[in-house]
Image (cartoon, grey):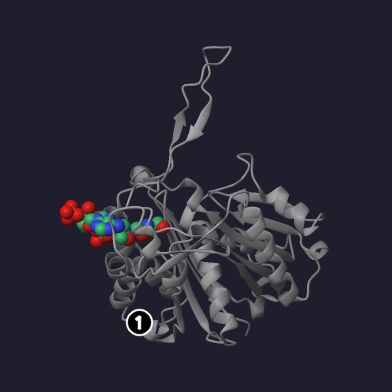
Amino acid sequence: MRSLITQGVKLLATGSAVPDLCITNQIISNIVDTSDEWIFDRTGIRERRIVSKGQSIIDLAVKAANKALIKAHLEPLDLDLIILATSTPNDLFGSASQLQLRLGALQAAAFDITAACSGFIIASVTAAQFIQNGTYSNVLVVGADVLSQWTNWSDRRTCILFGDGAGAAIFQATSVVNNNFLAFQLNTDGKQYNQLNISYKNTQQKQKVDFSDIGSFDSISMNGREVYKFAVSKIPQSIQFCLDSVHISIEKVDWLLLHQANIRILNAVAKRLMIPYAKVISNLSKYGNTSAASIPLALDEAIEEAKVSCGDLIVMSGFGAGLTWGTLILKWQD
Ligand code: UT7
């Protein structure tokens, strides 16, 4: 796979937002048969944020995007494209138009990408293609999900894991020599689509006609062990492939930023790649698995805390439903 690059890409700024409502492990242990100890030992999660009734991903996405715009010193009208990575839209036809409207970014084309926990990586790679081929200069990518709205709160195998949030990143065109978007790889294994899904279901409601269903969706269903095994085996390969493709050695990696699914997955991937744990970015204990939001949310926090500094090499990988996975290697503001 080769692509023609007419412009470079840089990550200009990030932003993030989480809901106010905090659900601790203790609260969950009053709902299902579990404990703070079990959840923390098996996942690294202590608490998660959940949207209140009436809130949607758009509320979170707008907040995250506005913070990124302010930091980037851009006006909404400067945006050429908005990509909203979400699997929990508030409109099945897509929610990016609502984000465009609420931001006042009326010059920007806007569309959704549905790829669950890989969504932010896939959307960022898509943004980079539009910039690198010379089409657009300023692209906003937002990863936002509210999986709490699709959680079965009686299923202790899944309800402990997920939280809601949004993370935004603004990518901008730069010269080819200053390109900071170094490498990527995207993968899908459709054979495993049913290891983690929110499947369509017929509501059985009577229609005037009998040739059509009234649709709705089930709640999250996951084979945790299989998804765990998949992540730990595929992600190191994907990262190694990307690093090799640009002749960068593991020692040169400053930060490993994986989709925040489970602390044991983060540890296992870092160990396989021989990346010291001090280089692993994690905020899992505070937010749980926020799906498409998890990588940009953690990145934004790491930048705000001045952990990540200019010129740092960040390896980001997302993985999840599909099953999909993807890696991108980025230099932060050289
Ligand atoms: O974002 C998408 C990516 N998703 C993931 O990455 C999820 C990956 N998978 C995981 O993180 C882990 O598989 C889980 C955290 C979901 C589960 O951890 P596990 O170590 O794989 O546990 P398990 O499913 O093998 O279950 C072990 C035991 C079972 O009991 P038995 O059969 O051994 O008697 C479960 O019934 O733990 C039991 N269990 C629980 N016990 C207390 C399952 N969930 C709970 C719970 N509290 N919440």
Return the x and y of residue 317 as percentages of the image width and height: 45, 67
Which quadrant of the view contains residue 137?
Answer: bottom right
Q: Residue furthest front?
A: 30
Question: Of 149 and 36, which appears nearest the observer?
Answer: 36
Q: Is residue 177 above or below residue 17?
A: below
Ligand 1, image quadrant it occupies: bottom left
Residue at point 37% right, 72% down? 240
Residue at point 34% right, 66% down? 237
Estimate how packed mark 1 is, as few (under 14), some (14 to 19) or many (20 or more) residues with alpha carbons within 10 Å: some
Return the x and y of residue 227 as percentages of the image width and height: 32, 55
Return the x and y of residue 210 as percentages of the image width and height: 52, 12
Q: Quadrant of the C terminus?
A: bottom right
Q: Is residue 181 visible?
A: yes
- Judged left or right of residue 172, residue 216 is left
Q: Is residue 318 above or below residue 158?
A: below
Return the x and y of residue 59 as percentages of the image width and height: 66, 57
Q: Does dot 1 land on a helix, a strand or a loop?
A: loop
Q: Is residue 228 visible?
A: no
Residue at point 27% right, 65% down? 38
Question: Of 290 and 96, which appears nearest the observer?
Answer: 290
Question: Of 67 and 323, which appears nearest the observer?
Answer: 67
Q: Which residue is mark 1?
A: 275
Q: Is residue 317 above or below residue 218?
A: below
Which quadrant of the view contains residue 229?
Answer: bottom left
Q: Amino acid at mark 1?
A: Ile
- Judged left or right of residue 123, residue 72 is right
Number of labelled discs? 1
